[in-house]
Image (tube, grey):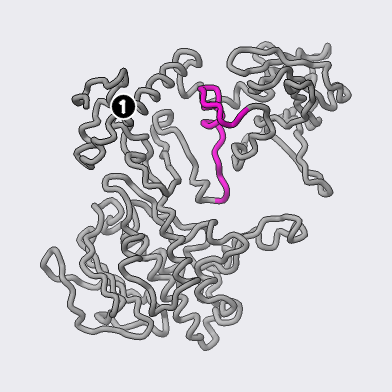
Amino acid sequence: MADEGEACDGYLEPPLFHKLLELDSKLKLYRKDFQRRYSKFRGRLEEIEKKEGGLEEFAKGYTHFGINNHPQGGLKCCEWAPGASALYLTGDFNGWSYTSHPYQKLDFGKWELHLPPLSDGSSTIPHLSKLKVVVQVPDGGLLFRLSPWARYVVREPTSVEYDWVHWDPPEPFKVWQNDVRMNLMQYSFTWGSVHVINYEYTDWLLMNFFHSAFTQSFFHSISHARQLSLCLFQEVSGMPALCRPIEEGGQGFDYKLAMAISDKWIQLLKEKKDEDWDMGNIVHTLTNRRHGENCIAYAESHDQALVGDKSLAFWLMDASMYWDMSVTNEVSITVVRGIALHKLIRLITHALGGEAYLNFIGNEFGHPEWLDFPRAGNNESFHYARRQMHLADDHGLRYQHLQNFDISMNHLEERFGWLASPPAYVSCKHEGDKVIAFERAGILFAFNFHPANSYTDYRLGIHLPGKYPYHVTKSNLLFPRFRRKAGIL
């Protein structure tokens, strides 16, 4: 194997690769793979710098592709379709003539069309007129597609297809927000293989974030292009060095999502009785992450709450959430258990699961039911395409207690800073007592998941000797009427 700093088989070694090996010496076995990946990255970056004017300019594809106003007047239309034989623009502006406005083929799969202004200076394509790109495939057939760079698309109430509507208002808005969702998954609307691994396809990846609800959507950004941004990764393979600097041979992400944690909680609630919960398995799931690579922990996300599944609170309390959440009613044992477990699950996930914590919208107060977006199967209903944020503000309902717990939990973290501290030292995983205990940021966390037993004078080993005052059990956090006394686990 090559020495540090040397090239192997023509590949460059990351300049700080030795720091990565200090974290995990076993990665030395894969040194050549890290060198190859780093060299490919450097080569592609240099190509982008040379041909596109830098990564930041390259990522601004929205200013180049689609339809944009030309600096010298008229419109500039640009698409990327490397497999097309010809490309045309059609729409209301030309009476839907399929071939009257052809694009000119450029290098790297690009196609370009310039439309000069009309004699009166107005745009060739009026605001809110409909458009389509006509793609001629190699066998001569024509395909009608929406531009993936379309700024505005609409769907008729009686149709499942979307129309591309040209957006060029006479008076521009002062505030404009673009919610990028699933453009990347709709690449079939263009022509060309999705497996084209070249730098013009990289532009597509840089500009199209896969964002369905919040988790998969926690956004992929470009840290070095904007110094204040965070770069987040979603995956479950455990691939080494995802969240290590590029100079070490990593991929430069700041955090990755700890996706297995939320699945574990739902699995326990769906498949296991309370007395059958495996403490060791819970701890393993919460701590199963690579040292030195930051993770974002969360108790639930849209993956759990979408139709076909239920939110965490709804798995715990189900129909009782419709009848027993009023503070004026006698509380049921189902709600007592549900609220207590909801708080325990969130706190142990927050404290043990990672270096950052995510609340899926409504999780902070135990949002009931599920999410479902308008579709043919529900008669295009918006009824479940909502988050009932008002529930936490209603002082006649118990959701306020769950939200107050969330507020207190985050204030406690701000005070002690366990998310910024090294991983916890777990000292107890007692299967019989259903107790988990660990130390992090100078705090001793002790969780009792036993469905029936409480413990006094419970003996726990600690790493740092001293007196440990209570911070949670004194705070009225378990349940207003049925909370356990301070000092009782």
Q: Position of residue 274 (x, y in %)?
A: 41, 78
Quadrant the C terminus occupies: bottom left
330 on left or right of 171: left
Residue 197 lies in the magenta stretch: yes
Residue 474 visible somewhere in the drawing = no
- State the image quarter where residue 66 is shown: top right
Tell me if residue 337 comes above or below residue 125 in the rendering: below
Tell me if residue 422 comes above or below residue 370 in the rendering: above
Q: Position of residue 251 (x, y in %)?
A: 37, 34
176 on left or right of 164: left
Check disc 1 and report the residue beneath it.
35
Residue extending furthest toward the bottom: 330
Identified at 83% across, 16% down, the residue is 100
Residue 190 visible somewhere in the drawing = yes
Tell me if residue 221 comes above or below residue 470 in the rendering: above
Identified at 50% across, 82% down, the residue is 334
Q: Position of residue 110 (x, y in %)?
A: 63, 18
Q: Which residues are magenta?
A: 193-213
